[in-house]
Image: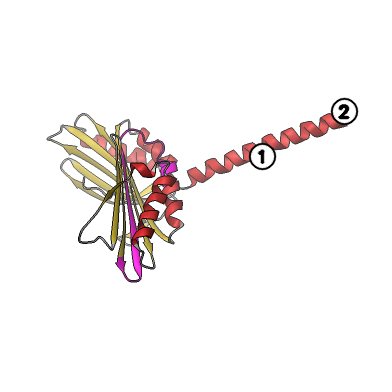
Amino acid sequence: MKKILIVISLVFMFLLGLFVCYGESKNSSENNGYLQMINSFENTNSEFKFYNIKANAYIDRSLNKEEMKNICVDIISMLGLEEAQLKWIESKKKAQSQVYAQIEEKNKNISIIVANKSKNESYIIVDILENKVYKDIVDIYTVLENTLNSYCKRVDVYTCLAGEYKKKLQLYKYDDILKKILYNMNAKEIDRVEEENFMSVTAFSKAIKTDYLEYLGNKVNLNIGIRYSENEEKTMIYIATPIIKLDY
């Protein structure tokens, strides 16, 4: 009987450990606020068009060409892709100081630039555009940030989710959508720009734990844009952190 109780206790502790590990993993993905941003996007009832992640990283030394290529391969590998998929684009003018690699698929485009800025500084720029699925954005962000942090301490990541409505929305609807996003993101509006068929709002969200920017003497880490295109006869919506880094 005693042995049976010991076995039951060990099994219970093992299962408890699994639940604790799962909880920590879930919390770590929720802590940066990206899951909440996805939920807020879904609540807009727009049709998903694409997401875009732009990352800039700075290294306090110059790199040789082999190091640059290794960084590109490392980033692609950590994103779960193969080196064979990389297309190397050479620049004659910057052949010794820059490496440009790209993966271009039907639903995904990834570009990586690694370059020397000076004798004591180099930088990495990663641009990811995906137009098929968006729920993996949490994992992509985490992997990209961790990979870039392994090379340098300063990493800036800009993320944007974009959707569309296949019609023109009334101005009151813009406001309804905006209020819902701000509420879901536990965010305070900082500034607003309104024009005909266009609205852009910057805000500070307590749910987002990534970096923020200083704007008009305030912290901002959330940017919402809504724009109607007369040519395409549709309304686009963008939810980004910390700001939208796209021409829209």
Residue 205 shows up from this direction: no
Residue 242's spot in the image, x, y percent? 35, 51
Residue 202's spot in the image, x, y percent? 31, 50
Residue lying at 15% horizontally and 32% vertically, measured from the top left: 233
SS state under label 1:
helix
Of the image marks 2 and 1, the number of the one nearer the N terminus = 2
Please give left or right for residue 191 compared with residue 29 in the image: left
**Residues at circles 2 and 1 in contact by the CB criterion of under 8 Å:** no
Along the line of sight, the residue nearer the viewer: 23 or 178: 23
Q: In the picture, residue 168 is in which quadrant?
A: top left
Residue lying at 55% horizontally and 42% vertically, measured from the top left: 25
Q: Residue type at mark 2?
A: Met
Along the line of sight, the residue nearer the viewer: 122 or 181: 122
Residue 197's spot in the image, x, y percent? 17, 40
- Residue named by callout 1: 17
The tag on residue 86 is none
- Quarter of the figure with the C terminus: top left
Instruction: Write the start and end of the magenta stretch as one range.
Output: 117-141
> For the image shown, how many numbered marks are present on the structure?
2
Please give left or right for residue 195 compared with residue 216 in the image: left
Along the line of sight, the residue nearer the viewer: 227 or 126: 126
Residue 140's spot in the image, x, y percent? 41, 43
- Residue named by callout 2: 1
Disc 2 from disc 1: Cα separation: 24 Å
